[in-house]
Image (tube, rainbow, N blue to C red):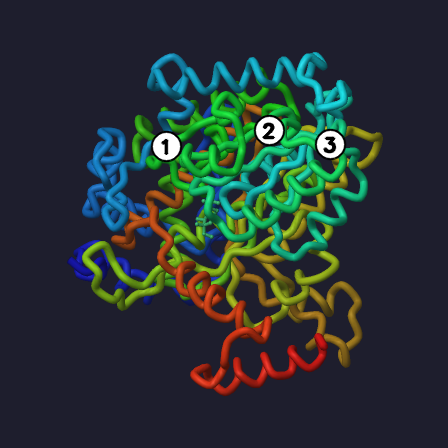
Amino acid sequence: MQVPLRPAWLALSEHARSIKHRHLRALFAADPERFDRFTVAHDQILLDYSKQRLDSQTMELLRQLADQAAWRTWIERMRSGEAINHTEGRAVRHVDLRAGDSAPREVKAVLERMAEFCERVHAGIWRGFSGERITDVVNIGIGGSDLGSRMAVHALAAFQQPDLQVHFVSNLDSADLASTLTRLNPRSTLFIVASKTFTTLETMANARTARDWLLAAAGDDSAVARHFVAASTNLEATAEFGIAAKNVFEFWDWVGGRFSLWSAIGLPIALAVGHRNFRRLLAGAHDMDEHFFNAPAESNLPLTLALVALWNTNFLSAHSHGVFPYSHSLALLPSHLQQLEMESNGKRANRDGLAVDYSTNPILWGEAGTNGQHSFFQLLHQGSALVASDFIALGKSDFPLPGHHSSLLASCLAQSSALAFGQTVEEARAAGIPDHLLAFRRFPGNQPSSTLVLPELTPFSLGQLIALYEHKVFCLGILWNLNSFDQWGVELGKQLTGRLAPCIRDEAPTDSLDASTRGLIGHLRQIRK
Ligand code: F6P
């Protein structure tokens, strides 16, 4: 069934007609309890969605929609191991990776091996080919095998192990690998080749070049065993690359790339912050899983985030979604969420393969506050686009210095408030703005936002936060009737790359190509001569 035919969807369309043009000023004026009514909390995480353009009836109808979409049944289907990723014939079991004592035996076994490995590296027992201890780890991976762990390592800088630097290389552009290697010593550098498939073009190219760089210094193939480990599901390919079986940390096809930081793909996190902190990260995610599975709809954080997103996208036509963590350490969260949300729900075929006739995932982007305020916030305040936002604030700084954090928090609240309420011409005049500037000093407001508040950034709270967004994505997939766990859309470009590479090298004719690609290749051949 197409989603809009669900009764609650039709009721929401009707309801949106009346609420669409109401200003947040009016909504707040009409309801002094609005903050209490539209906040939900779990553990110490608070979600304030009172600055969203909705009322109690909106939420009531949205929850009816979730029930009509059978969100609880979908949770059960996921948890029972059903192949809900039906286009790839795979189960979706990333929550099993963080289930603690109830995790599957094979998950626990890999976690144990990761712990032991981390201990050996940290204690200087694991040494390079010349006997030097490891000082630098380079994670080579891309997409889900890079973004999540890169983001978490950056976010948990306050928990960084001493004497070990973790670097990330993802791009096929050799500038990425070359600029990293130039700072490193092959004798004390360990590479993690992180790839679910172990066939990804970028990762394999970087891994081969890194291996050549190592062998140029070591002069002996046996050095690979001391300097290369892998996180992968493809044990044949890791062996073929020359990585000893004992140095491969396995995971399974039921772990989607963008949900894989909880698996062996999280090895760089465990190395950066210690295995105990990695376990705390898993525990935080597990805590959010339990909340999501058990909390009623009214107080369910992931479901609420999803319902608000659906409302903004499908009923208010906000096709852009900003994420603004007021935390320098969370600066990479928007990049991780871009893959998580856009690769999961950036789709136009529903689960039955029919083209949808409603909007699916908005474009997600973002930047850490306060930096964003001094670049694109102008457009949010006075531009013509409706943009929905998530602000994320921390009660405490993870790197406290006197005088900074209260101003940071004030900036966060000031922005969401200014976006919601704006400034009228009358207010501008009363503030002393001269008449000829009044038109430029008017802020229309009515830009919807939610604010998430975490008490502090720890491995546990970071785990909760990431899992919160993962389940939001899952709920949206249910509501939009999409398979959130495949990513066929990235395949076409990959295939074309294979066809065009020989053309760029002047080893294949370009006659059959479109005029633009042919023209560009001709130009590139000229300038590369
Ligand atoms: O870009 C597509 C994608 O398949 C992502 O879904 C995945 O996270 C990434 O490539 C990397 O894949 P792999 O881990 O197999 O190298």
Please tell me which residue is depicted at 35% across the width and 16% down the height of the picture: 105
Residue 269: which numbered mark, if any? 2
Write the residue at 42% across / 23% down.
98
Q: Is residue 112 left or right of residue 123?
A: left
Q: Is mark 1 within 8 Å of ligand 1?
A: no
- Image check: 65 left or right of 18? left
Instruction: Pick the residue in front: 328 or 519.
Output: 519
Which of these two is toward me, 55 or 350? 350
Q: Quadrant of the N terminus?
A: bottom left
Mark 3 vs 2, N-terminal side: 3
Q: Nearer the viewer, mark 1 or mark 2?
A: 1
Question: Please, what is the three-letter code of the amino acid marked with disc 2?
Answer: Ile
Between 180 and 254, the one lying in front of the other is 180
Q: Which residue is mark 1?
A: 252
3 vs 2, front mark:
3
**Residue 218: image tag:** 3
Q: Do tag 3 and tag 1 residues touch (Cβ < 8 Å)?
A: no
